[in-house]
Image (cartoon, helix red, strand yellow):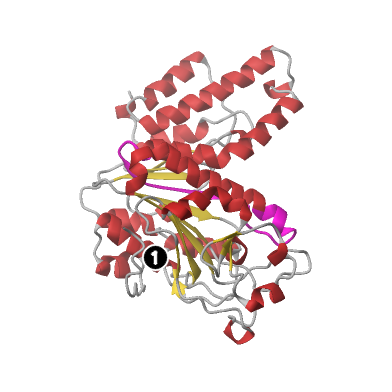
């Protein structure tokens, strides 16, 4: 029966089938993009939504102006030394063994071409679009991963999936995308469940997602039968599931992606939020870094031997100000940090050209100065992993990009 339903119809049907519990209890609430393509190398892209403070994550403790601009933030925690000049925030210490093994690296003072307006929405759109164009009329609205898929031979139809409530511009474009979106209660009769099982048949991604949805719906029904209140859950049970779901979200996303990457999938992308740390940054960034660390370590554990053929790129829309604000946080800035991990990465190194934090070196007298385009690191990674021609990367995938010299971030 599934073969008789076209992708548009299936997309509509699946958007109507959803979980009956909190978004935080579901690992599928953040969009996941998966794509199958030729070859054995793997790429994972993690979008860090909210503008991660690169100066806090990879601290330039060797820069004499760092402590001057950040008297509170520079003293927070117990960072671990990376190379004698930069230190790693203690809340990302789970990744320190990867640094020691040469499987973790960072690129500092990087950004997209986005400047001055510092809007999360616009910044994220440009990051996922991969262009140097401003937002607004005439801006490119498809995503750089989709354009990459369009440039690779032998990518078959229905290679990409977005699982979650919202679209990711990263994969918008000509290549087909199917979506499953848990945004309403799943309340199915036995016949309805059998129908969905027939729809999922032959499609491993949707089969697993659908099974998870129906299992959680049955949990709610069971709770209702046992008198746990409206919706089938007591407040205590709901709160417990919400807390557990939030804490395990990054692990669940990474495990789901890693399992697919062990099969025919070769590209995976998802996002982690929680980086908008205007106030009490030491507390807020602890949670976000914990999720990021969980995601990367879970990817490594799940991928096993395939970790050696994998590159993970974690990037954010822009950085934060050099100076901390009066609320023990930092405001929207420009340049920041990109994380690179995986067995295919030449790790144990900080890439990029450090501009320093002297007042004359700051961008607009407030932000870390961008010295390299974050798209260049993504482009060189894609060229190395998938043998994509430089001309295609600079003209079609990342329009207007000058890749520059190869930073040799891959082994």
Location of residue 328 by image quarter: bottom right
Which residue is outermost to the left?
154
Residue 284 on the magenta segment = yes
Q: Secondary structure at mark 1?
A: helix
Q: Position of residue 266 (x, y in %)?
A: 33, 45
Q: Position of residue 50 (x, y in %)?
A: 60, 58
Report the residue at 21% width, 52% height from top. 153
Q: Position of residue 353 (x, y in %)?
A: 46, 76
Is there any visible trace of residue 273 in the rendered image? no
Q: Can you say which quadrant of the picture contains the C terminus?
A: bottom left
Which residue is outermost to the top?
225
Location of residue 157 by image quarter: top left
Q: Is residue 176 left or right of residue 125?
A: left
Instruction: Report the residue marked by disc 1.
Output: 377
356 and 227: which one is in front?
A: 356
Report the residue at 38% width, 68% height from top. 376
Residue 403 position (above or below residue 284): below
Range of magenta residues: 261-285
Q: Position of residue 22 (x, y in %)?
A: 64, 34
Location of residue 216 by image quarter: top right
Residue 33 on the magenta segment = no
Report the residue at 27% width, 66% height from top. 392
161 and 350: which one is in front?
A: 350
Which residue is outermost to the right?
326
Is there any visible trace of residue 396 in the rendered image? yes
């Amino acid at each position: 029966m599934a073969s008789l339903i076209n992708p548009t119809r299936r997309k509509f049907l699946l958007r109507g089938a959803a979980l009956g519990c909190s978004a935080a209890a579901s690992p599928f609430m953040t969009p996941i993009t998966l794509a199958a393509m030729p070859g054995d190398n793997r790429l994972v892209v993690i979008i860090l939504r909210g503008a991660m403070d690169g100066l806090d994550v990879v601290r330039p403790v060797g820069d004499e102006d760092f402590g001057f601009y950040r008297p509170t933030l520079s003293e927070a925690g117990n960072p671990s030394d990376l190379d004698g000049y930069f230190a790693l925030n203690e809340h990302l210490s789970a990744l320190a063994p990867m640094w020691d093994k040469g499987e973790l690296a960072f690129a500092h003072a990087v950004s997209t071409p986005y400047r001055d307006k510092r809007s999360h929405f616009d910044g994220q759109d440009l990051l996922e679009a991969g262009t140097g164009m401003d937002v607004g009329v005439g801006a490119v609205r498809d995503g750089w991963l989709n354009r990459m898929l369009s440039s690779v031979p032998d990518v078959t139809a229905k290679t990409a999936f977005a699982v979650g409530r919202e679209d990711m511009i990263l994969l918008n474009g000509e290549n087909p995308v199917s979506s499953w979106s848990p945004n309403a209660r799943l309340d199915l009769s036995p016949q309805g469940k059998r129908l969905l099982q027939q729809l999922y048949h032959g499609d491993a991604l949707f089969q697993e997602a659908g099974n998870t949805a129906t299992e959680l719906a049955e949990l709610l029904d069971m709770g209702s039968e046992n008198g746990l209140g409206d919706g089938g859950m007591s407040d205590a049970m709901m709160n417990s599931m919400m807390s557990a779901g939030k804490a395990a979200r990054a692990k669940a996303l990474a495990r789901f992606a890693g399992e697919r990457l062990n099969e025919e999938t070769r590209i995976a992308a998802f996002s982690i939020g929680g980086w908008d740390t205007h106030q009490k940054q030491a507390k807020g960034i602890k949670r976000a870094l914990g999720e990021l660390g969980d995601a990367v370590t879970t990817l490594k554990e799940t991928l096993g031997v395939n970790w050696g053929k994998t590159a993970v790129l974690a990037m954010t829309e822009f950085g934060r100000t050099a100076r901390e604000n009066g609320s023990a946080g930092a405001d929207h800035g420009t340049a920041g940090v990109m994380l690179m991990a995986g067995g295919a990465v030449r790790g144990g190194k900080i890439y990029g050209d450090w501009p320093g934090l002297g007042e004359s070196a700051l961008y607009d007298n407030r932000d870390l100065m961008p010295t390299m385009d974050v798209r260049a690191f993504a482009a060189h990674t894609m060229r190395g992993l998938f043998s994509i021609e430089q001309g295609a990367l600079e003209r079609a995938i990342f329009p207007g990009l000058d890749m520059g010299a190869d930073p040799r971030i891959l082994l």
